[in-house]
Image (cartoon, coloured by chain):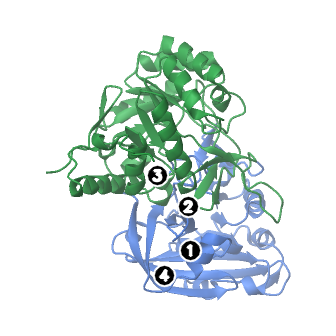
Amino acid sequence: MMPDMKVKLCGIELNNPIIAASGTFGFGREFSELYPLSSLGGISCKGITLAERDGNPTPRIAETESGILNAVGLQNPGVDHFIKYDLPWLREQNTAIIANIAGNTVEDYCTMAEKLSDSDVDIIELNISCPNVKSGGVQFGTSCESVGNITREVRKHCSKPLMVKLSPNVTDIAEIARAAEAEGADALSLINTLTGMRIDINSARPIIRNNTGGLSGPAVFPVAVRMVWQVSNAVSIPIVGMGGISKWQDAVEMMIAGATALQVGTALFNDPYAPIKINEGIEKFLSEKNISSVTELTGTIKPW
Amino acid sequence: MSYDSQIFKLTENKEIAKGIFDWTVKNDELPARAKCGQFVNIKVPGRVLRRPISICDATDTTLRLVFQVKGEGTKVMSQMKPGEDVEILAPLGTGFDIKPGKRYCFVGGGIGVPPLLFSAKQTDNPMVIMGFRNKDLVILKDDFKAAGAELYTATDDGSFGIHGFVTDVLSEHMGEFDEVCACGPVPMLKAVAEVCRGKVRCQVSLEERMGCGIGACLVCSCKTKIDGEEHMTQVCRRGPVYDAGEVFYDA
């Protein structure tokens, strides 16, 4: 019997646990030329802001050993454009839509949450962990007080399921997770990128024009697994795990650590078909182990 | 379907100048979709990011890809052997807009020369002006001649062909062609655009560090002015080819 790949996240049924990670998949159109987006559990859209943003100067990307650094700086067309021009098309693709929002101020987040609550998105992902913008972003995500505050305020304006995306650039991610849960988050997604840097030894110039960028890819996977495990011990709301998942074994590992669903991002740059292959791999693994539903993997870790 | 990622067979890999390699890769489906000025994104064993390389030439079943070893990824590529499989996302981007009945002048600098070969082959009686730092880096001379091009080669140090810059040659022949297509370093593109301004239409092909290669990740954005409106556009999708007036060269 084929295993059931469906998972439920904040009451939304996903076709499977694999969601395209914010910032790597745009609003889905480009990848839809390769495969139907219904083969994904969902899409976390490119981070959107209240007004259109041009993002950072280039170069915005650098390769590292087993990873990449990026500093795109939230280039996006703005929330109104997203709702009017991108969302209607996305809605027809038979996949869950997660709107990832970022702001300069708490009020920005609240305004966007209000607009998106009246729209057709399934889940709102509060991006308080972007390391690549001058104001806003990660500044809201690094203390329990600010995470609790922004979650509480946005919650008042948000009638959709609210998922808070956590930064790994903190001392104790479990505390931060508890603060978000206490103020009404329905789910948590983690990890965003780790702040990093590369320097060209000939020019002594940082490779990325922003000087620093966010590290992602296989290099951060063990950090992500550790944090998903710690957070799953600290909260009772579902966790969407991400950070360096590039093969089906990583996906299974992250679910065992405590994730209900997963996001795959950087792996798409290496292989645009990565989410499809990961799903196929999980399905085969479940069949071989006689596990009837992928949901049975979540949190099955047996720690020493 | 416009582009796809498929397995190609590497059939040839030779060093045609110091540090510059000439690949031929075979695949039954994707090469036939290639248009001049487009590029491919190559999966390199052991690397996270693919490497974007311009299409130097194409048949219905083969692509020719000429690249310079610049770092770890291209070094691995240079060491791959004929017979090996390589996964390639192709064809990508918007290439040169070539109109029938016009005479084109193709201007290339260094490793910007390769994509002009496939382009020159789409036109009648093309003029080709290529520039290199020195004689050791001169490539594709015989290929352009075989394509029937009126060919001018310049080197910065005068060690081969004309001693000078491509823009010197371009200015000298202004009036002998209808449009210009250029690919090379940004200072060269800026200079070529300046020479052409107000005289002939000029298209330029840009280079940028890329992620996905299909326009989704917004890593390769550049500031452009298209139809009077300033927007960030993706070099991998709206580009790599732009009208010379659409690009901000000093951004």
The answer as to whether the residues below labels 1 and 3 share one chain is no
* SS state under label 2: loop
User: The disc labelled 2 sits on which kind of residue?
Assistant: Leu
The answer as to whether the residues below labels 3 and 4 share one chain is no
Display colour for chain B? blue
User: The disc labelled 4 sits on which kind of residue?
Assistant: Thr
The label number, if any, that marks residue B120 in the structure image: 1
Residue in view at x 31 percent, y 57 percent: A281
Q: Which residue is mark 2?
A: B49
Q: How many marks?
A: 4
Task: Please name whichever residue, B63 or B36, is drawn nearer the observer in this view of the structure.
Answer: B63
* SS state under label 4: strand
Q: Which residue is mark 3?
A: A245
* x, y percent for residue B205: 63, 61
User: The disc labelled 1 sits on which kind of residue?
Assistant: Ala
Q: Nearer the viewer, mark 4 or mark 2?
A: 2
Figure chain in green: A
Task: Please name whichever residue, B177 or B26, is drawn nearer the observer in this view of the structure.
Answer: B26
